[in-house]
Image: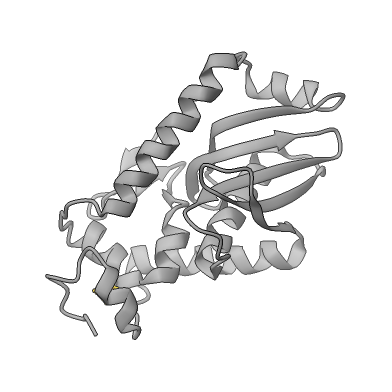
């Protein structure tokens, strides 16, 4: 499913303008929880750093899962998938989602579609359900819900990467939806300059951060 027409944001990398609204990657909802200033350094100041070992490992594991899936996958359009999942179960990987409404976009690691519910899975290294990880998967749920326009239940889930271990799951209910919309609005305020980027006060985060050698807010 192709993304709608977009133009790059004039000053902030990775941000696009889709249907006259700024649109940012849903993965930013995870980065925001780690440290907003990292988003600023990477995308406003556009500082380049080498990827961390964890990032390289994650990309490799992702590629293996994707290859395994492709060997047995049957191509189908989004509408075909929605229709056939009303009577049977199906699975999709690297599923593209975009919401011009909320100004977010991304790729869902895996979706299980059943006649009763959609289970949205985001793969993570480790088994700790950080708020930032939960916010990211809620962002996927919101974009997906905006696209499907039907009221099948949506379940947000976090899975330990490379395993079948779903270590956290929750219904994407009205409370979750309200809270993630509030966070998305906050990120749009950061992009527009209405709100200043905050930074962590946790030295452990700074120690592991890939910007720590150049960051002027490092603690
Ligand atoms: S070094 Fe610390 S304050 Fe700076 S971007 Fe990284 S986590 Fe944030």
Give coordinates of residue 148: x percent, y percent: 70, 37
Image quarter for residue 75? Answer: top right
Give coordinates of residue 33: x percent, y percent: 45, 70
For residue 126, side relative to residue 88 (left or right): left
* Residue drawn where x is 33% and y is 53% of the image: 54
Q: Is residue 21 above or below residue 81?
A: below
Figure colour scheme = one colour
Q: Is residue 102 above or below residue 3?
A: below
For residue 43, side relative to residue 32 (left or right): left
The foreground one among 173 and 19 is 173
- The image shows a total of numbered marks equal to 0
Residue sticking out furthest to the left: 214
Q: Is residue 155 above or below residue 129?
A: above
Q: Quadrant of the C terminus?
A: bottom left
Give coordinates of residue 138: x percent, y percent: 61, 56
Give coordinates of residue 85: x percent, y percent: 79, 26
For residue 199, side relative to residue 94 (left or right): left
* Residue drawn where x is 48% and y is 28% of the image: 66
**Picture quadrant of ligand 1:** bottom left
Is any part of residue 34 visible from this angle? Answer: yes
Is any part of residue 188 visible from this angle? Answer: no
The foreground one among 153 and 148 is 153
């Amino acid at each position: 499913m192709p993304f709608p027409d977009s133009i790059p944001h004039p000053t902030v990398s990775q941000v696009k303008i889709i249907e006259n609204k700024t649109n940012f990657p849903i993965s930013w909802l995870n980065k925001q929880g780690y440290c907003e200033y990292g988003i600023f350094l990477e995308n406003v100041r556009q500082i380049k750093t080498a990827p961390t070992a964890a990032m390289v490992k994650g990309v490799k594991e992702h590629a293996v899962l994707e290859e395994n899936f492709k060997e047995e996958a049957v191509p189908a359009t989004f509408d075909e998938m929605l229709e056939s999942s009303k009577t049977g179960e199906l699975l999709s990987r690297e599923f593209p989602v975009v919401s011009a409404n909320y100004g977010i976009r991304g790729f869902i690691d895996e979706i299980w579609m059943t006649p009763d519910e959609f289970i949205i899975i985001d793969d993570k290294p480790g088994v700790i359900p950080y708020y930032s990880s939960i916010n990211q998967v809620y962002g996927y749920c919101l974009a997906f819900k905006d696209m499907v326009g039907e009221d099948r239940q949506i379940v947000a889930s976090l899975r330990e990467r490379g395993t079948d271990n779903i270590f956290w799951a929750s219904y994407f209910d009205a409370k979750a939806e309200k809270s993630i919309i509030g966070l998305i609005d906050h990120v749009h305020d950061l992009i527009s300059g209405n709100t200043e980027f905050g930074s962590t006060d946790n030295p452990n985060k700074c120690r592991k951060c890939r910007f720590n050698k150049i960051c002027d807010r490092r603690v």
